[in-house]
Image (cartoon, rainbow, N blue to C red):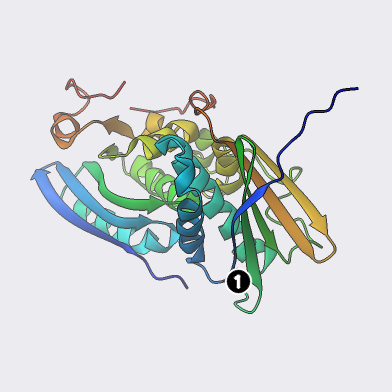
């Protein structure tokens, strides 16, 4: 039986941030700096930055309840042709902010008609910015793992619903 | 509460159209700044508001939610919203969220001010 050797993931960065709103900007800047040498296409890098910022904001607000004494841990790895960013908070014992069952798919038409909250785009954005996202828990901790290919960007965004009254 | 990191200035293009120049970050924290700019432009008689995103540095999901809130208000008052100056990335996000179907997107200010009858509608 032949075996394919996979290189061990290479750690590009590892850091922690206090759970203070606005620190998602620090996260995206540090992640962008850590992958600079990989020369991701600009669109792909922007997508990664948006996903990291949204996931970090979720960790700050939902996972750690905006408690500055609780850290959000962020690790950036290169694994073969992929960049993997893990974002860990203290929300392992609740699923607020990440529950697939509770998360309503945002629909602009329904929002404009007052049938959905105008907010609630974060999880939707993350899912469409990266090639894969998964969420795991380990006791107190919850880790969101974002994966993006270093290679060419995927085709355009997915289709949604039509908006009545659009110009 | 997070401090707004956005500045929004109003320019009257003509009696019925105003341009709001957005600089900095569009997040939930900038809601009061944007709504104040909208109210001021509307009070000055603008029926069409053109959002200039050329100075946009960062927009997150909170900012998108804020734009939806602005759209709800504009629709109620029968005001039109248009935009120009979006980077490729944020234009992609407008397409993903379908905001581009509710806010007409143009390549530049000249096209945006020409309005729906102009040639400037982005493909």
- Residue B107, placed above or below residue B25: above
Task: Give the percent coordinates (x, y) of residue B114.
Answer: 14, 29
As helix, strand or loop, the secondary structure at mark 1 comes to: loop
Chain letter, disc 1 residue: A
Between A35 and B1, the residue placed more toward the observer is A35
- Name the residue that disc number 1 marks: A66
Task: Give the percent coordinates (x, y) of residue B5.
Answer: 34, 64
Residue that sits furthest to the right in the current view: A1
- At x 52%, y 41%, the residue is A111
- Residue B65, placed above or below residue A40: below
Q: Is residue B44 visible?
A: no
Between B53 and A155, the residue placed more toward the observer is A155
- Residue B48, placed above or below residue B111: below
Q: Is residue B70 left or right of residue B17?
A: right
- At x 11%, y 48%, the residue is B12
Q: Is residue A26 left or right of residue B13?
A: right
Between A145 and B1, the residue placed more toward the observer is A145
Q: Is residue A154 visible?
A: yes
Task: Give the percent coordinates (x, y) of residue B82.
Answer: 27, 37
């Amino acid at each position: 039986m032949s075996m394919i050797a996979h290189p061990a993931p290479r750690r590009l960065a590892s850091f922690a941030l206090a759970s203070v709103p606005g620190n998602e900007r620090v996260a995206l800047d540090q992640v962008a700096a850590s992958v600079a040498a990989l020369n991701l296409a600009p669109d792909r890098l922007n997508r990664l930055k948006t996903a990291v910022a949204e996931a970090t904001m979720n960790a700050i607000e939902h996972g750690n309840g905006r408690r500055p004494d609780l850290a959000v841990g962020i690790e950036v790895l290169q694994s073969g042709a992929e960049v993997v960013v893990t974002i860990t908070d203290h929300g392992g014992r609740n699923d607020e902010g990440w529950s697939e069952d509770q998360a309503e798919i945002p629909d602009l038409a329904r929002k404009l008609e007052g049938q959905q909250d105008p907010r609630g785009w974060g999880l939707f954005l993350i899912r469409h910015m990266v090639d894969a996202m998964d969420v795991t828990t380990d006791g107190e901790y919850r880790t969101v793992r974002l994966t993006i290919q270093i290679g060419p960007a995927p085709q355009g965004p997915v289709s949604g619903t039509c908006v009545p009254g659009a110009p | 509460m997070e401090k707004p990191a956005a500045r929004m200035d109003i320019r009257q293009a003509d009696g019925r159209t105003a341009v709001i120049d957005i600089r900095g970050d569009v997040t939930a924290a900038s809601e009061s700044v944007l709504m104040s700019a909208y109210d001021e432009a509307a009070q000055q008689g603008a029926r069409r508001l053109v959002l200039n995103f050329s100075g946009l540095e960062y927009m997150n999901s909170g900012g998108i939610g804020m734009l939806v809130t602005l759209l709800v208000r504009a629709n109620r008052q029968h005001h039109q919203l248009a935009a120009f100056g979006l980077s490729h990335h944020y234009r992609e996000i407008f397409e993903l969220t379908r905001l581009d179907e509710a806010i007409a997107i143009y390549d530049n200010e000249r096209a945006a001010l020409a309005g729906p009858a102009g040639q400037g509608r982005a493909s």
